[in-house]
Amino acid sequence: MIPKEDILEILDGYDKKDLTIATICSHSSLQIFNGARQEGFKTIGICIGPPPKFYDAFPLAKPDKFVSLDSYKALLDHSDELVEDNAIIIPHGSLVEYLGIDKFESLAVPTFGNRRVLAWESDREMEREWLLKAGVNIPMRFERAEDIDRPVIVKYHGAKGGRGFFIAKNKDEFQAKMSSQAKYAIQEFILGTRYYIHFFYSPIKTQGYKLKKGTLDMLGIDRRVESNADEIFRIGSMNELAEAGIYPSFVVTGNLPLVLRESLLPKVFELGERVVETSIELFGGMIGPFSLETIVTDELEFKVFEISARIVAGTNLFVSGSPYSDLVERNLSNGKRIAQEIKLAMETNKLSEVIS
Amino acid sequence: MIPKEDILEILDGYDKKDLTIATICSHSSLQIFNGARQEGFKTIGICIGPPPKFYDAFPLAKPDKFVSLDSYKALLDHSDELVEDNAIIIPHGSLVEYLGIDKFESLAVPTFGNRRVLAWESDREMEREWLLKAGVNIPMRFERAEDIDRPVIVKYHGAKGGRGFFIAKNKDEFQAKMSSQAKYAIQEFILGTRYYIHFFYSPIKTQGYKLKKGTLDMLGIDRRVESNADEIFRIGSMNELAEAGIYPSFVVTGNLPLVLRESLLPKVFELGERVVETSIELFGGMIGPFSLETIVTDELEFKVFEISARIVAGTNLFVSGSPYSDLVERNLSNGKRIAQEIKLAMETNKLSEVIS
Amino acid sequence: MIPKEDILEILDGYDKKDLTIATICSHSSLQIFNGARQEGFKTIGICIGPPPKFYDAFPLAKPDKFVSLDSYKALLDHSDELVEDNAIIIPHGSLVEYLGIDKFESLAVPTFGNRRVLAWESDREMEREWLLKAGVNIPMRFERAEDIDRPVIVKYHGAKGGRGFFIAKNKDEFQAKMSSQAKYAIQEFILGTRYYIHFFYSPIKTQGYKLKKGTLDMLGIDRRVESNADEIFRIGSMNELAEAGIYPSFVVTGNLPLVLRESLLPKVFELGERVVETSIELFGGMIGPFSLETIVTDELEFKVFEISARIVAGTNLFVSGSPYSDLVERNLSNGKRIAQEIKLAMETNKLSEVIS
C-alpha cells in the first residue's frame, strides 16, 4: 500500500482552494458529482474510452472534465494528471472491483477514506473477526453439513454478485442440492426482512451523534432488488422450480427505498457505533460512508450479514435526500455529505484525517 | 376518562402564544418534532431514562427539551410539568401501547385528537361495528370452521404485532393447522395488494375536500414490511415450510412507499369520508391523522381490514412530503400537518374542537 | 385520422400567449395539472358528470376549469369549447381507453405528441415489428405448444389489465393449465426483476442527450404493483393454489419507486434511443413521454416486453421529482416536463413539431 506519508506529501502540493472531486463513471457517480457541485467543487469523471453519453441527460451531475483511459489499470499511469488537478478520488464499489485491491491500494492519488479498510472488508474471515469483535449479531456458520439444524444459505467461493448461492431449508435439502466439486461456505439463513442501512462516520465533525472521536450519521435505508430471486416465486416454490431445472439467483439489479420502525433506531445507531469504534481499534477507522446489511427478524433483532465500507449504490435512491437525511439537512445526499466532509476537513486543516 | 371540561380548564390556563408540542420518543416522533419546529412550536420529548442519543443525529427533529421518566406510567405524575410548558401531547401507537388505554384516557394533559376514539379502535367488535355502519367493505368473518369456503387468516386472541397469525387456503388446511387450545378469530384472507392510506380529518379547516363539517386530506400511502412473511417464500411455499417446522410471521419492521391508480382516488376519499362521518355520529369524530388499512383486489375493489385512529408509522416515509401531500403543499409531512392544525385552532380560537 | 393540416389550422387560430392544458380527469391528471400550473398554463379537466370532488383535496393540482360530459364519446362534440380555450390535450392511458382509438384519432383538438403512435402501440404485431426493427431484446414467442422449452406466460386475446394471463414453468404445465376454447399468445416468461423506465423524447430541445434530431430524457423508474400476483404467494405456490382453485391475476393497482444499477444506464439510454429512432423512421416519431417495460435478468440484460407511448401512471410517484429527474432539474415531474416542452415549442415557434 502506498504509505500515508506519500499521500500527505502529494496533498501538500495541492491548491486547497481549488480541489477537484474525481470518481469512476459508474456505481454512484451521478450522486457524487452532483453533491460535489452543490458544495462548489469541480469534478472529474474517470472512464474507459470516450465519455459516457448518458451524463448529457443529467446536467446537474455531469462532471466538468473526463479522464479517458484504455483500461482501469491505466489509471495508475494517469495519477499525475489527477494530481495536477488537485483531485481527491472518491472510491466506490466499481472502482475497487475494476481496479483490484492491490492496484487501488497503490494508487498515488489522495483518496477519500481509509484504504486500509479494504483488506478487512474484502476478506470474509477478517470481516467476520471485525463483526464479532464489535459484538454485533451475525449469522451462524456451519463448518460441517451434519450440523445444519436450520435454513441455510450456501455460498460457493469466488461467486460474484449473488450468482452461485443457494438456499436450503434443512440438512436434507442441503445434501440434495449440493454439488460436490465446489468449495463453499454454509451460513444460517436468517428469516426476516432485509434493511441496508447507510451510515457516515466523520472523525472530524463535532456536532451530532458523538462517538469517542467524531460523529455518526444515518442517512437512509434501502432494500436491494435481486434478480431473479425477487420475482421467481411467481412461477413456483423453490422445490418445484428445482424439479423444472430452474434456480434462484441473487444478482443485485437495483434498489428500493424503505424506512424502519422508529423504535429500532437506538439499535441501529448502536450497530453503527460498534462497527466504527472497532474499526478504529483494528485499522485506524472506517471513514466516510458505509453500509450495514442487516436482516430484522420477527423478534425485532438485527443480524448483520455484511459491511460495505464505502458508498453503496442504494444511496442512489436519495440524491435529493431521504426520510432520514432530510432531518439532518434538507435534500442531503450521500454524495453531498462526502463533499461536505472534504470541505470541512479543508477548512479546519484536517484533510489528513479523512484522506489516505 | 378525564372529562373534556377538565382538559378545557387546563387549556384555559395555557399561554396560547407559547404552546409546546410533546410526544413520546418513539414511533413517529422525529416527524412530529420536525413538523412542530417548521410551524414554530417548541417541542418536548418524553422518554424513559436519559434522552435517546439518536436525536443528536437528526438536528432538525431533536426536541427542545426532554422529560425523562422512570416508566411510562410515571407520565401521569408528570402532567403538571407538561402543563406548565403549555404542552399538547400528540398521541401515537407507542404512547397508547406503553401507557395502556386507561392511563392514557385519564392523562391530565391536553391531547391532540379525540380520546374517545381509542375504545372504538382498540376493540375488534366495536371497530367492526364502526366499519359496517360506515358501509365500507370488510373481510368476511367465519364463526364456524365448517363454513370456511375460501382462504382465511386466523388470528389468535391477544396476539401482538402480527405474531400468532396463520393463513389457510381452505377448510382442510385450517383444520390441519389449527391448535385447539387457543381462542381465535377466522377472517377471510383477501387476495390482493395492501395499501395503507394516510388521511387527516380537520373539523375546523374550511378549504379542501369538504365533509359535513370540516375537511379531509389524503397525505400518502405505504405498505408495511412484515417479518418474516415478506421474504420467507424465498425458501419454500407455506406448506413446504410447515413440513420443515417453519412458519410465517407478520411483525411490522418498516414501511415502503407506494402510489395507487389515480382512478381509484374517488373511492379512497369515499372510504375516508364514510369512516369519518360515522365516527362523528358514534363518538364525536376521529380528529387528525388516521389510516385505513386496505387491500385492493383484482376487481379494483377496496377491502378495509383495520383503522388506525392516530398517526401511523408509515407516514415516516414522507417527512419531506409524499406524491400526494406535495399536491396540498410542497414538503408537507403528517407531523407538519398536525402542527398546522393546532396553529389554525389556536388562531381561530377553536382549540377545544381538536383537543381532548 | 384527422389530417395534421386541420390541426395546424386550428392551432393557427390559437392565442399562443393564452394556451390551456387539458386532460381527462384520471390516470396521471394530478401531475399533469400540477406541472402545467408550475409552468404558468391554465388547465382544464375533462370529466364525466360533475367535477370529481377529490381535486378539492389537492389545491396544487386542481384544474382551473372543468368540462363536464355525459360520456367520453361526447368529447367529440365539445371540441369547439376546448378550441375556444386554446386547449392542448395531453393524452394518457385512460383517455385512449375511454375514447377508443378511432375517436381519439379524429378528435378535432390539438393534442400533445404524435397520434400516429397509437396504431403502432396498440397492435401487438405492429409493436413487435417496431421493437424487432429497433434491435432490442424481446421475449421469445412460441407459435406451437410443442416448442415450449422454458417458462412461459400465456395471454388470452382481448384480456384486459392483466386478467386472463397465466404462467407455466414448462410444456407439461402449459398443457395442464390451458383451456382449449380461448385464443392465446405464448410468450417466454423472463426470469428477472421488472423495471418500468420513464423516458421523454423531445424533437426540439437542443441541450441534453442528443439523438439524430432532438434529445432524450430518462426521468424515473417504477415497478407496477399487481393484484393479486404480488401477494398471492403468501398462501401457497402456484401449483398448490391451482389445486385449491386459486389463480394469480396481474391487474395493476399502483406503483412503487426503484432505481437501477448505475452501470446499466448506458444500456437504458441505448434502448430508449433505438426505440425512438425507429419510431421516427416508422411513423414520424414517438414524441413526449413514453415508457419501456423491461425485465433485467441475472445476466444484467434487458428484455423489453412492452412500450407505452404516452405518460405512464408510474410517473405519479414522482410529482416532486425522482432520483433521476432531480439531476435534470430539481423537482421535475413528467407533468412539468410536458408543460415545459409545450412552452419551448411555443417560444421557438415549433408547436407543429410536438402537436398532432
Image (cartoon, coloured by chain):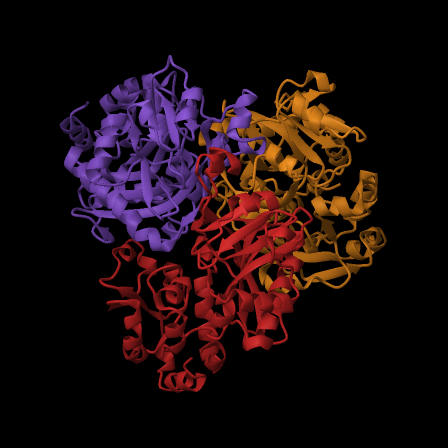
Chain colours: A orange, B purple, C red
Question: Looking at the image, which residue sits at the far top?
Answer: B181
Is the residue C270 above or below the residue B156 in the image? Answer: below
Q: Nearer the viewer, residue C107 or A271?
A: C107
Q: How many marks?
A: 0
Q: Is the residue B175 above or below the residue C290 in the image?
A: above
For the residue pair A254 and B348, the one nearer the viewer reads as A254
Spot occupied by residue A21 in the image (x, y as percentages of width and height):
69, 53
Q: State whether residue A335 is above or below residue C338.
A: above
Horizontal side of residue A306 vs C306, given as left or right:
right
User: Which quadrant of the structure image shows residue B138?
Assistant: top left
C279 on left or right of B296 = right
Rendering quarter of residue B199: top left
Task: Tell me residue A5's x, y (percent).
Answer: 82, 40
Residue B161 visible in image:
no
Q: Is residue A237 left or right of residue A178?
A: left
Question: Which corner quadrant holds the C terminus of chain C?
Answer: bottom left
Looking at the image, which residue sits at the far front?
Answer: C180
Q: Position of residue A14 (x, y in %)?
A: 76, 52
Front residue of this view, candidates C39 and C335: C335
Out of A197 and A248, give the one closest to the viewer.
Answer: A248
Q: Quadrant of the N terminus of chain C?
A: bottom left
Residue visible at 41% across and 71% down in the picture: C101
Residue at 44%, 83% (x, y): give it. C4
- Give how far across and how far down residue C303 sits, in percent: 62, 56
Q: Say if residue C308 shows up in the picture.
A: yes
